[in-house]
Amino acid sequence: MKALIWKKDKTIEIIEKEIPKIQNDDDVIIKVTYSSICTSDIHIVEGFVPKAIEKTTLGHEFVGKIIEKGKNVKLKIGDNVAVNCESFCGKCFFCKKGYVNNCENGGWLLGCSIDGGHAEYVRIPFANQALTKIPKNVNEKSALFIGDILATGYWSAKLTEPNKYDTIAIIGAGPVGLCSAMSLRYFKIKKIIIIDINNYRLNIAKANNLADYAINPNEENVFEKILSLTENRGADKVIEAAGKLNSFEMAWKIARANAIVAIPAMYEENQILPLPYMYGKNLTFKTGGVDAAECKLLMKLIEKNKISTDFLITNEINFNDIIEGYQFFKNNKDKCFKIAIKH
């Protein structure tokens, strides 16, 4: 079968690999139908994910059809499924608390340390936890982001301990930021502010009613604007979904005293926590990565038309063009949100 791998020289290549086989009773083999490219995939290729193993098949955001299963798997052969970006056993200390990202037997494996979804076929461990059946009235592309960016956005929103009276600022109007805003809308938050240097992305947020206010730091003073919208206090909660050079500093600066700062962003370099300057502000920081434990709920919300990520698909390509797709995704952040790759 064809599979996309990465190499330590920061290149990617389509190669031939053997079709995976069932290894454990909790495994399934799925035939991939659609996948997508995540910024985390780019981070792996560029060497920013220490746990990633060279020549592993990339991809952790995909959907497909079960063609083979182990004897413990409850789903059926032929079921269409959305794949969780995390593999988790559901039984260990962390899983029982809902901290599935830190599963003692799993975590972020697919596309990182075991072969992922940028291939024709994939082995999925812990299938009862890792797969969500796609209802017949939900198309595959609508379910494509449930296991990663939508799960991340929902988790980020929950990290803020949202209250309907809150004013919550989101830094970054990329897919995770927009999914966070979508989730906050579901929680009926009073006021949502989204911040980005890209007007195209800000306009998408407003066009989809995901933000009450949009701020471009290149056009107005973010700190002054936030204060004007919050009776000079600052945001009640902040979600830092940008992961850029100055976005971490912005996050704690625009937060009011005693606020929560949620950080799902993945940084490419260390960040500084200037405790003397923020002393007395009494902030609570909650950091990534995602505990993607609510995929079944998210599928139900999509099925009931409570939320939709369809607008995030700005480009579609075939798997044979995936190398060009990686380059396009990396270099066209201004107008490319997500690419749906047909397998």
Image (cartoon, helix red, strand yellow):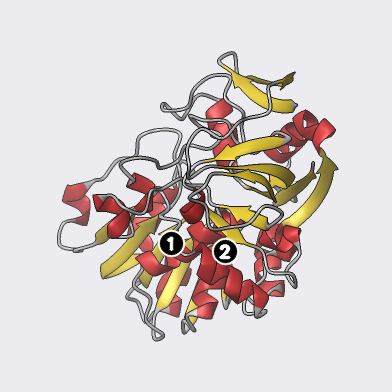
Does residue 221 appear in the picture of this structure?
no
- Across and down, in percent, residue 172 comes to 54, 56
Quadrant for the C terminus, please: top right
Q: Quarter-wise, where is residue 179 in the image? A: bottom right
Horizontal side of residue 106 vs 334, given as left or right: left
Residue at image x 65%, y 68%?
A: 205
Quadrant where the N terminus is found in the figure = top right
Query: How far across and how far down the image is residue 133, in percent?
Result: 62, 62
Task: Say if 306 sits above or below 109 in the image.
Answer: below
Q: Amino acid at mark 2?
A: Cys
**Quarter location, residue 211:** bottom right
Return the residue at label 1. Answer: 156
Callout 1 amino acid: Ser
In the rendered image of this protein, does residue 72 appear above or below residue 270?
below
**Residue 104 left/right relative to 181:** left
Is the residue under label 2 in contact with that under label 1 (CB below 8 Å)? yes
Residue sitting nearer the eye, 244 or 107: 107
Q: How many marks?
A: 2
What residue do we see at 33% from left, 45% from top?
102
Q: In the rendered image, is residue 300 in sight? A: yes
Q: Secondary structure at mark 1?
A: helix
Distance from Cα at disc 1 to Cα at disc 2: 9 Å
Residue furthest out toward the front: 71
Residue placed under numbered mark 2 in the picture: 179
Q: How packed is label 2: few (under 14 Cα within 10 Å), some, or many (20 or more)? A: many
Residue 239: x, y in percent?
Answer: 43, 61
**Residue visible at 76% across and 49% down in the picture:** 340
Res. 17 mark:
none
